[in-house]
Amino acid sequence: MARPHRPVQGSRYEKRRVAGTVAPPLQKGDGLSSSEARELGSRIDASQQRYRVSAIRLLADRACGLVLVDSVTGSDHVIASSADWHRLEAAQT
């Protein structure tokens, strides 16, 4: 014979539906979107041999940055925009 269902005791709350919120677009200088980071990473990998893209890192909210590994020194660099990449590329020469 089945056991009777016990009534719920303790704290209970009523579930309510909440409308989803749309995140505002990224401001320039905040970082890259994930699609921009993938595109920039593929351009970096195709254009030179020194730096290798090892990861896409979430910086804040929806802003991403690329983690580059320098094959000469072994150090990591995090770039958050294409301007950061151009500065790093100019510094290597």
Image: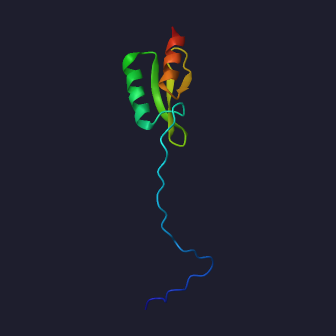
Front-lying residue, 31 or 73:
31
Residue at 45% over, 36% down:
33
Whether 18 is drawn above or below 35: the answer is below
Q: Is residue 55 visible?
A: yes
Residue 7 lies in quadrant: bottom right
Residue at 46% over, 15% down:
50
Residue placed farthest to the left in the image? 46
Q: Where does residue 92 sit, x and y in percent of width and height?
A: 52, 11
Q: Is residue 71 visible?
A: no
Whether 5 is drawn above or below 74: the answer is below
Q: Where does residue 17 sit, x and y in percent of width and height?
A: 48, 67
Please state, as top left, top right, bottom left or bottom right, where the N terminus lies in the image.
bottom left
Front-lying residue, 91 or 82:
82
Residue at 52% over, 26% down:
79
Say how many tags the image has.
Answer: 0
Front-lying residue, 45 or 15:
15
